[in-house]
Amino acid sequence: MSLNDHSMQALSWRKLYLSRAKLKASSRTSALLSGFAMVAMVEVQLEPEHNYPPGLLIAFSACTTVLVAVHLFALMISTCILPNIEAVSNVHNLNSVHESPHERMHKHIELAWAFSTVIGTFLFLAEVVLLCWVKFLPLKRNPVDSDSNSTSISPGKAAAITSTVIMVPSGIIFILFAVHFYRSLVSHKTERVERELDVLVQLQDQLDRGDTLHPTGSHFA
């Protein structure tokens, strides 16, 4: 096998292992976060006597439903594609990499990765804030405290506001980190492609000069 073919084989196997790692991470993250969201919706106990704002209940139910739908969609993609990639990666044959669907299903793999790690995680942060409001808002002040200071907010609303104040900067940091990570990843891929192109240009120059690609330095006849 020539050096050029060996480099292309190594690149294909690296893409296969990267796709497999992304699908595994997406499936684990989606199963975990969607399970937490379902448990939160089932276990939350609404107070029948409390008059909840309709917008809060609608936002909580919509966020939970979209969160579960997004993660289940990512989980479905991972479950459908991952077995085919695993079957190829376990075969000890360099040419078997072309039998893997990771190149053709590259967009689906990236979509599952984005749904699970970016959109799904951001929805989970919003889910935590809404859950705190639904859980703590019905808590009222004690009668003695309400008579002495009628202008202060209730402990439940204070707890919900505190969670929101903490989570909003966390969400902003999460978005900034995601943008920074994506730009760093794109920059890394660009530098790697440029290095691979430089290697291919050097190999092409050697072929144009009539040199062989073997380390013996012998020439073609």
Image: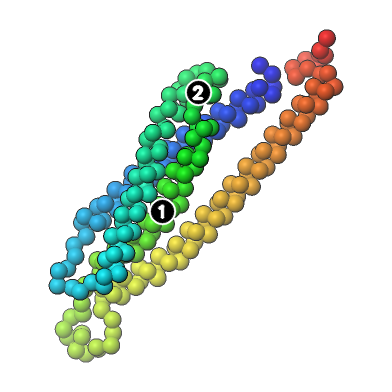
How far across and down, in percent of the image, does residue 204 sit?
A: 78, 26
Q: Residue under circle 2?
A: 99
Residue at image coords 83%, 23%:
208
How far across and down, in percent of the image, does residue 143 sit?
A: 16, 84
Find the residue positioned furthest to the bottom: 148
- What mark, if any, has residue 200 been given in the picture? none
- Whether 151 is drawn above or below 6: the answer is below
How far across and down, in percent of the image, does residue 51 sit?
A: 20, 74
Q: Residues within 10 Å of mark 1 (few under 14, many from 20)?
A: many
Q: Residue under circle 1?
A: 121
Find the residue positioned furthest to the top: 221
Describe the element under mark 1 as helix, strand or loop: helix
Q: Amino acid at mark 2?
A: Glu
How far across and down, in percent of the image, does residue 30 sit?
A: 37, 45
Spatial CA distance of label 2 from label 1 is 33 Å
124 vs 138, left or right, is right
Residue at image coords 27%, 66%:
57
Q: Quadrant of residue 138?
A: bottom left
- Whether 73 is drawn above or below 10: the answer is below
Q: How is the image coloured?
A: rainbow
Visible residue check, residue 28: no
200 vs 61, left or right, is right
- Please identify the quadrant where the C terminus is shown: top right
